[in-house]
Amino acid sequence: MKLSLTGSDSWKLYLLLILTFVNWGIEARKWQILMLTLEKTTWWRAMKASLSGVAFAINTPNRIGEYGGRVLYVKEGHRIQAVSLAIAGSFSQLIITFMMGCFGLVYFLNFVPHNISKSWPSYQFWIRITLAGGSVVTVLCLLLYFRLSWLTKSIEKIPRIGKRIHQIAILEELGVTRLLRVFALSFIRYCVFIFQYILILQLMDVDMNSWQIAWTVSVMFLILALIPTIALAEVGIRGQLSIQLFGLFTTNNVGVIAGTIGIWFINLVVPAIVGSLLILGIKIYSGKDQ
């Protein structure tokens, strides 16, 4: 493996690091837009909430703890409602993951070398099944996402259930325009993820073109979204999965694993460390007030 960190490729490393800040900046903006239905918050406060959410999420299944970290920066009377808004934001990102993952599966059907394995006909069958199922789920999720107010009102009408979940009524105030803005930001953030992978795998001298990397990553994200994992232990699954998927195009397994771990570290571990420091700061500040 040749590591291209010097010379003409060094700019890719700097851009990769800059995109990490862009990534979380976009997520902070999403949170700021969602919170407008509840209370006004600054972009910087939204950024701190997002990073604190990562600190909570890293040790919980499917990052469910993220909501607990975000509400630390929300007024006490609004915290349960804020969780509903956070779920709406995560839902938009999940829909993008499903949608782009389906496009990635289409790419696999048409451009993966069919002579890679004697079992390719079997793989092709399962890819088609997954694509069909994924497409249906994506369309249904899109319909639900842009009809959140209708969904909320429908749930509230259910006897014995509606009265207990009145806190989700805040979702009724999320108009289509606001949901569309959040959805667009989720798509941009997804593109940032993809571009980061392209940059780091090029730095690791992985012999794949940008389209191959982009669509392979989209399929990997789709599979990861379907597997219940704890973020801290996810690196092992990512490593194995990346070898299987990227191995269809390249033999540079070391470069693929190194790139995958690198992205996991700068996009998840580093923000979690920063978020932990922010949470510690909140506790110290609260202690002084007492």
Image (cartoon, helix red, strand yellow):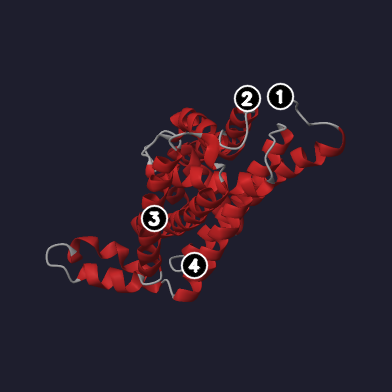
The quadrant in which the C terminus is found is top left
The location of residue 158, given as percent across then percent down, is 16, 68
Query: What's under tag 3, amino acid-wise?
Result: Gly
Q: Residue at x 57, y 39 (%)?
A: 271
Would you name the residue on which mark 3 appears?
134
The residue lying toward the viewer, choosing from 218 and 21, is 218
Can the viewer see residue 220 in this picture? yes
Pick whichever of labels 2 and 4 is earlier in the sequence: 4
Query: What's under tag 4, amino acid-wise?
Result: Leu
Would you name the residue on which mark 2 appears?
254
Q: Residue at x 36, y 59 (%)?
A: 137
Estimate how packed mark 2 is, as few (under 14), some (14 to 19) or many (20 or more) residues with alpha carbons within 10 Å. some
Pick whichever of labels 4 and 1 is earlier in the sequence: 1
* Distance from the alpha carbon under mark 3 to that under mark 1: 36 Å
* Distance from the alpha carbon under mark 3 to that under mark 4: 32 Å
* Distance from the alpha carbon under mark 2 to that under mark 3: 31 Å
* Distance from the alpha carbon under mark 2 to that under mark 1: 7 Å
Query: What's under tag 1, amino acid-wise?
Result: Met
Q: Is residue 18 above or below residue 96?
A: above
Would you name the residue on which mark 1 appears?
1
What SS does tag 4 mark?
Answer: loop
> Disc 2 vs disc 4: Cβ atoms closer than 8 Å?
no
What SS does tag 3 mark?
Answer: helix
Pick whichever of labels 3 and 1 is earlier in the sequence: 1
